[in-house]
Image (cartoon, coloured by chain):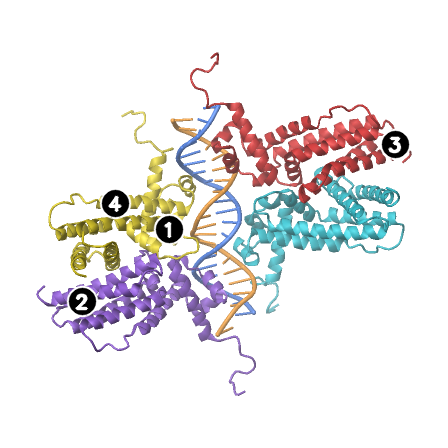
Chain colours: A cyan, B red, C yellow, D purple, E blue, F orange
Amino acid sequence: MSSPQPTRRKRANGVESRQRILDATVEIAGERGYDGTSIAAVSAKCGLPASSIYWHFKDKDDLIAAVIERSFEAWLSAVELPGDEGGTSLERVTAMAANVAKSLVDAPDFLRLGLMLALERRPAEPRGRTVFLQVRDITHRKIAEVAAALFPGLDEAAVDTLTTYAVAGADGLFVHREIKGDSVDLVAMFELHAQVVHDMAARMAAGK
Amino acid sequence: MSSPQPTRRKRANGVESRQRILDATVEIAGERGYDGTSIAAVSAKCGLPASSIYWHFKDKDDLIAAVIERSFEAWLSAVELPGDEGGTSLERVTAMAANVAKSLVDAPDFLRLGLMLALERRPAEPRGRTVFLQVRDITHRKIAEVAAALFPGLDEAAVDTLTTYAVAGADGLFVHREIKGDSVDLVAMFELHAQVVHDMAARMAAGK
Amino acid sequence: MSSPQPTRRKRANGVESRQRILDATVEIAGERGYDGTSIAAVSAKCGLPASSIYWHFKDKDDLIAAVIERSFEAWLSAVELPGDEGGTSLERVTAMAANVAKSLVDAPDFLRLGLMLALERRPAEPRGRTVFLQVRDITHRKIAEVAAALFPGLDEAAVDTLTTYAVAGADGLFVHREIKGDSVDLVAMFELHAQVVHDMAARMAAGK
Amino acid sequence: MSSPQPTRRKRANGVESRQRILDATVEIAGERGYDGTSIAAVSAKCGLPASSIYWHFKDKDDLIAAVIERSFEAWLSAVELPGDEGGTSLERVTAMAANVAKSLVDAPDFLRLGLMLALERRPAEPRGRTVFLQVRDITHRKIAEVAAALFPGLDEAAVDTLTTYAVAGADGLFVHREIKGDSVDLVAMFELHAQVVHDMAARMAAGK
DNA sequence: TATGAATGAGACTTCATTCAT
DNA sequence: AATGAATGAAGTCTCATTCAT
């Protein structure tokens, strides 16, 4: 009852505040993009005054970049294939695609914001854009490794084309769902895409 | 001599001013998105004062919507299949895809801006977004018609899935090129995509 | 009585607004220096909203520079020796000095602000500082011409030293009055200074 | 071994921290003036967090005042005439002037900041300004004493005028060097000034 | 057909300062 | 003896928009 430090925390909890700010920012930036994200809006959503946001982040650019970094890691750990062995290569590819689709349905902010940033062309490129493109490259490379492992017959150029096509399809289907809303069955679409890409890989690995 | 205007015209050419404003706006909005496009920036680029922009357009929303409309029409007439007869269905589909790819390389602003608008989620949806989604639907329907004509065996649902997949791939490949730059051969990628989609259609039309 | 456009001017008078802004700014900047001059304070003093100030001036730097320019011109025309002929060289020099002293008592803002700017050392030098130093150089040259005319025996280096010393003394006495207030008889001090400088010139022109 | 502090000291050296803060502040305030000196900038330059500055100084005003005090003392001990006997009165005056000039070249921050503060007119006068004007008065009195000793024939008013003129010239020449930079030989200028003032004193002491 | 000028709201950011630890 | 975190006020400047001419 007379507890010395019960609910009344308030002052000074850097780590938690930082999280609150980032949480608010993903939500807003994921919906409105870079320019549409105002510090005042973030401040209102997280409850901290604007000046406190600047204690944790150098400027808006830094904040958006931090958001991209954090939500990529979150997305990555959500995707992380739980069991990637077992089944035919088609089954495995399909399972992976379904997994990615699910993660994008659950947490679309990362990719939505990332694509908005990627499409922009501004004189002083936001750091968040750079970060997004970097993690995107990392992802591309990981997928390429999987493809190379599944289809040893493919040369490097073929693997790259295949990966590019796979990623582009994923992006496009994601955009489609963002536009059309929840009625779109993203998992089914990704599974279809997985099959198509798998066929393509098989044909490539065969003769050409 | 027989000019209807009395003394010097020179100033006062509504149509041309309107074009200049729209030209400036596509460029800026195509690069920076809705929020990133300021009336002041448009004014600076087209040379007309901000108040003149408001003489031609009700507000920013109206301006952006007009840009979308005009650049969609421009894009449409650039794409308009010059001769859609002749050749196998694969050849025709491939030619159409190459054609679209070329138009997107030449004038990417329309789709870039459109996708940016489409990805945003804001309380008061900009009219430009609505317009983009409408013309997108129109496009979808046109493609569906072509698909239905080429593969009479497909039912409506199959045609829709096929079209969705075709468009999504195109979007994704476009995004890929926007990110990676001129080194990406969009035409080749679109041709590959056309082939994949054609195979998919053929398989669908067959049994499943 | 029923005059169509009597007192009720208000909207849109660019020239007058510009003057009002400049008037307010000299007063504030003359008392508080560059950093101490806030746009909000200028806005409050001149009655125009801050955003209107930015219609007339690119930014704060531009505003301060404009102030320096205008008040230099005002000061110059206030100083402009009414009749510089007649009397001995000492009498003429003394009259000029008294004239300058009077102008500095009447309108000290220009020099006070200028000296404050001159003393500052900041990474991005304010344009106002540059302007002040330029007009200062012009003044220096004009004084040197007078000195050369009055004492034809002096070589260029001697004229320069003399002028520098004359200006430095004036600056120092001005600062003294700024510190000690109205009780200081600046005119008398300047006349004393004029005499000293005149002696110095005479001695220089003689042997060494 | 015999250190009174138990385990590691390292942190917690009040005196040194205070010095670091003051060192940083002279540098910044000497270059940017009162308003231009932000606690954040001082913090960045001295490496201590802003809150630590407030542990050592009540507020910004207090900090600036402390800087003025300390740098006046430093300047004073740098000037302190090493041997003020010997030679004619002219030689002695000249030597003193040269000494002062050297000190101002070596450490101009004190006077630069002081003059900036002195020129400002703000509702709530900073304590630093008051302190500067006080030490300035002290200096004035000391010089007056020297003058009275060297020229016993002068009455109080004459000594005051002489001192005022001497100080004003020094200020003005200092400002000149601050503007024109290292190329100005301040020592030579001060020696010239000393001679002029000496002549003036002699003439005053004679008849008038 | 246009535009110079104005304007309130709000953008990002820094300010001096406090307080609990 | 110090500091991480917070905060309200204020800083400069841009925003979309209006209105009289």
Establish whether labels 1 and 4 are both on one chain. Answer: yes
Q: Which mark is residue C37?
A: 1
Q: Nearer the viewer, residue B194 or B117?
A: B194
Mark 3 or mark 4: which is in front?
4
Q: Tag 4: residue type?
A: Leu
**A11 is higher (above) or lower (below) than A90:** below
Per the image, the residue denoted by label 2 is D198
Q: Chain of mark 1?
A: C
Q: Chain of mark 3?
A: B
SS state under label 3:
helix
SS state under label 1:
loop
Per the image, the residue denoted by label 3 is B205
Per the image, the residue denoted by label 4 is C76
Q: Residues within 10 Å of mark 4 (few under 14, many from 20)?
A: some
Q: Which mark is residue D57?
A: none
Establish whether labels 2 and 4 are both on one chain. Answer: no
Q: Position of residue C109 (x, y in %)?
A: 29, 50
Establish whether labels 1 and 2 are both on one chain. Answer: no
How far apart are the two marked residues, 1 and 2, measured between alpha carbons? 42 Å
**C94 is higher (above) or lower (below) than D21:** above
Q: Nearer the viewer, residue B94 or C68?
A: B94
Q: Which image quarter holds the C terminus of chain D?
A: bottom left
Examine the image and state in which quarter residue C52 appears: top left
How far apart are the two marked residues, 2 and 4, measured between alpha carbons? 33 Å
How far apart are the two marked residues, 3 and 4, measured between alpha carbons? 91 Å
Mark 2 or mark 4: which is in front?
2
Q: Chain of mark 4?
A: C
Q: Is residue B40 left or right of residue A171?
A: left
